[in-house]
Amino acid sequence: MQSRVFSVGNGVLWGEADAGIAATQAIVDVGYGPKALALLRAGLTPDAIVKAILDSDPDPGYAGQAWPKAGRQFAVMDAKGNYAAYTGPQATTWAGNKGGKFCTAQGNILAGEAVVSNMVKAFEETAGPLSLRLRRGARRRPGRRRRHARPAVGGARHRQEELRRLAAQRHRAAPAGRRQPGADQGAAPAGREVRSSGEGARARAARLCRRQRRDRSEFVVCSLWFVAQLHLFLLFFFFGSVFKSFA
């Protein structure tokens, strides 16, 4: 799942073992997810579930604004791999869905149908565990509009590519006299940014370790001081009792 919206997976994807999975996106109504799972447990087919939920949607809007169900995307798949998908006519273009064997891909704000078609193709052609097939499918998405999306997989490699791209943009926008040598390809500034970021993280970790060692040392000193004071108190108490007994 990829989106410009933070934590989008919390409301888009819904699944339950031995029942199936549902995805609700675009002009989202998160209530579609639990409703779909309940109907899957009841034994309805994905086609019937999609139709029933869309027909029961009163399309009330949100906070006094239009939030039309005609802009929603909704897909349901049961535990056997049977699925149904819906893309509303008002979903932001390009929007659509493509189904395959045990998979369905849907999206909006895409460059074209090739995006979802390539996702399905990559999933079907990849051998191995489900996690690997999903990863390969997620990486075959040419044409997503950059201003609405970022790579969903790849981690540090994608962050470094993004740093290089931004560095190259800053270099091209800077006056000729202020440009950094070697920044046309974006490699040198990005490398420096990545290294400086790593060095900063290491420095913070070193400071944290030093602080923890200092705190432990202070704790040990305080504990020893307390033990010494307790011993002195017990010693005075013992000698005082002895003197009283002789007196």
Image (spheres, grey):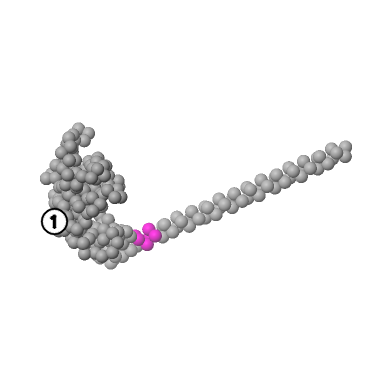
Furthest residue toward bottom: 182
The boundaries of the magenta stretch are: 193-198
Give the main secondary structure, helix, strand or loop, of the magenta stretch: helix
Q: Secondary structure at mark 1?
A: helix
To which quarter of the image does residue 111 belong? bottom left
Picture coordinates of residue 149, whole percent (x, y): 23, 53
- Asked whether 179 or 3 is in front, the reply is 3
Q: Is residue 129 at all visible to an observer of this figure?
A: yes
Q: Which residue is mark 1?
A: 113
For the point 37% across and 62% down, the residue is: 195
- Would you say 89 lies left or right of 39 here? left
Examine the rendered structure and indicate whether residue 68 appears above or below residue 122.
above
For the point 63% across and 47% down, the residue is: 222
Picture coordinates of residue 75, whole percent (x, y): 20, 48
Furthest residue toward front: 43
Picture coordinates of residue 64, whole percent (x, y): 20, 32
- Would you say 234 lies left or right of 176 here? right
Q: Is residue 192 magenta?
A: no
Examine the rendered structure and indicate whether residue 215 appears above or below residue 130.
above
- Asked whether 58 or 225 is in front, the reply is 58
Mark 1 is on which residue type? Glu
Furthest residue toward top: 64
- Asked whether 95 or 196 is in front, the reply is 95
To which quarter of the image does residue 135 belong? bottom left
For the point 16% across and 47% down, the residue is: 47
Picture coordinates of residue 159, whole percent (x, y): 30, 58
Q: Residues within 10 Å of mark 1 (few under 14, many from 20)?
A: some
For the point 18% across and 37% down, the residue is: 57
- Would you say 198 lies left or right of 123 here? right
Q: Is residue 107 at all visible to an observer of this figure?
A: no
To which quarter of the image does residue 62 belong? top left
- Quick one: quadrant of the C terminus? top right
